[in-house]
Amino acid sequence: MKKRVLSMMVMGLILVPFLFGPVSAKTLRIGSMGPLTGPYAADGNDIKNGVLAAIKVIEDEGGIPGYDTIQLFPQDTACDPKQAVASANKLINLEVVGVIGAYCSSSTIPASATLAEEDIIVITPASTHQDVTDRGLPYVFRMCGRDDAQAPAAVKFMKEALGAKTIFILDDKTTYSQGLADGVAKASEAMGIEIVGRDHVNQGDKDFSAVLTMAKTKGADIFYMSLQNHSTGSIMAIQARRMGLKAKIVSNDAMFHPNFMKVAKQAAEGIYVTYGYTDKTTDAYKKYEKIFTAKYGEIGAYATYAYDGAIALLKSIKAAGSTDPERVKAEMMKLDYDGASKHVKFEKNGDSGSSYIAFQVKNGDYVPYWTPAQGVLK
Amino acid sequence: MDYFIQQLINGITLGGIYALIALGYTMVYGVIQLINFAHGEFFAAGGYVGVILLSYFAGRGLMETHPWICLGMSFMLTMGYCAFLAMGVEKVAYLPLRNQSRLAALLSALGVSIFLSNALMLTQGVFDKPYPGELFNGGWEFGLVTISYLQVMIVTMTIVLLVSLNILVFKTKMGMAMRATAQDKTMSALVAIGSNRIISLTFAIGAGLAAAAGIMVGLYYGSVRYDMGFVPGIKAFSAAVLGGIGNITGAMLGGLIIGMVEIFGAGYISGQYKDVFAFIILIAVLYFKPTGIMGVNVDDTRV
């Protein structure tokens, strides 16, 4: 009996913080989603850090009236649709007012559907699949570009700047990479580039010698890598160089990451990457760069979009003077300013425009190489 | 033909790495009938210790002046470190459960695996760690066939390690003690063979081989990541089962077969079915010969 009373008391004590937790008000809660563990952990942490940098900026500017602090609840989606929905539900229970995320399109699509049931605003910094905004959900926004803009831009670049006649396309079977590879295949056919091979690899695999040997034997002008993640890309680039693959390597936005070059080193030199254009000389970018690098080190691929997404959300909440999704959305649609990554102005469906250009890796840096409007840059 | 030869070389390299990891599974199973799921993590730890040492040497400029000494030192120290790690894991996680049900030890192994891989993530970070491997770039070209120096190095190292293991197990007293313990712990104890010491030693040798495979994988693919032990661990385990678990020659053969089947499946059919083919072979062999290729049907309940 005594034991039972004791254990009941312990249970009661354990439950105390849960009872009083949510009542400690005056905190604005926002969530972020992204893979914090697993193969894409690096990108998920970039997103989280981008949002944290944005919170710091807003708090330094005086915060949100009516709230003492802004708290971030980062959730780990592990790039897994099931876990993404679970973390969306968790964020609903935490009563967040907005969410920045997720990373993988295959996570963002189901998670945003769950969050839409509670009218929570979602801004994805990284998911480029068309369906993210094409489903007509009222509170879904996107900071990055779209696949159906990236694929034609990449093909146009290969045709005009590289004079490609034949192409070998490879993807890693994720919603994102396969959708993009399909887009590239379609655009290549339309623009008269012959597809000499199309293959897939598995996520998390490290040995690509078989597929690369095939690509080498087919002898295409272009080897197009559509991959979910820069870590796979860097390993593939190293193996391709060692194998003596002569084709020019063109890749997608996920390769736009400092770690891609850190791992691939010389093997990355000369690789072309399509990515949204960011003017790094603007004041907005410099301010962001200063805050981010001081605390979190090098700026990863999607950190800037996550930062801009969070700033857009917090600015709108401030302007609306409320967390009512309808009113915050109205303020978001009014936004028209220069963000760190791009000019922030949302379209009706929640997109914010695509501005894909081609970069070339040169001496360990991404150098703008080609734009659709100006052609090859001198 | 060129295409076939190139894929054959790719397959042998991959198969050799699987074989080295598979040996650890099969040896441990041989002596205590435990599937050591933490074995993949010894492999990952090997990759990480290797990159730390090699980066240290490269940072001091020693890699340019004495490349082979640095490489040899890294291999020795890494294998030693992982051997001690494995002995420690054995003492902490498996020894107390030696006389409990086998399921308890198996679950303990799974726990250790998760613990080690997360410890690696927390201490080393989530990003890939690049290997200082520029030194070994390049290779020989025969028409369309390219054999990189690294592939040659990996295959040579694998052969050397496999041969020395065979000598150790089949030609020395220590090996005899090991085989005796594997056959019957009680009887070998009666002739003054300390079974705990032998089990410890088996873990150490298995982990040492996995650590060597870890460095080679790091050099070959250019980087390591904290979760690198999982997939190769599963493949190597399949290789051990395929060859007949508990049988050393079988594990080598199994590793080679899995590596080749993967590469040829990917090279001739499609890269997306790489893993499918590896496991189809496994299922097919187990269906027709449940003990594996070299396995013998032993009654596990021997006294």
Image (cartoon, coloured by chain):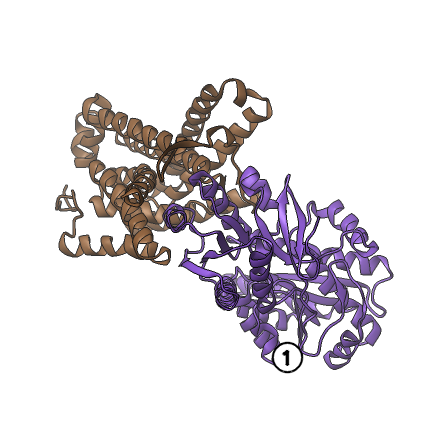
Chain colours: A purple, B brown
Q: Indicate the chain on which mark 1 is placed.
A: A
* Figure quadrant of the C terminus of chain B: top left
In the image, taking residue B239 as reference, residue A104 lies left or right, namely right
- Can you say whether A93 is above or below B216 in the image? below
Q: Which of these two is toward me, A317 or B257?
A: B257
Across and down, in percent, residue A336 comes to 81, 70
Residue A30 visible (yes or no): yes
Q: Residues within 10 Å of mark 1 (few under 14, many from 20)?
A: few
In the image, taking residue A83 as reference, residue A17 lies left or right, namely right
The amino acid on which the numbered mark 1 sits, given as a three-letter code, is Glu
- Can you say whether B290 is above or below A18 in the image? above
* Figure quadrant of the N terminus of chain B: top left
According to the picture, the residue beneath numbered tag 1 turns out to be A118
Q: Which of these two is toward me, A59 or A373?
A: A373
Q: Secondary structure at mark 1?
A: loop
- Can you say whether A37 is above or below B53 in the image? below
In the image, taking residue B251 as reference, residue B61 lies left or right, namely right
Across and down, in percent, residue B53 comes to 52, 28
Q: What residue is shown at x 47% (from left), y 62% (from top)?
A: A174
- Can you say whether B172 is above or below B49 in the image? above
Across and down, in percent, residue A354 comes to 67, 66
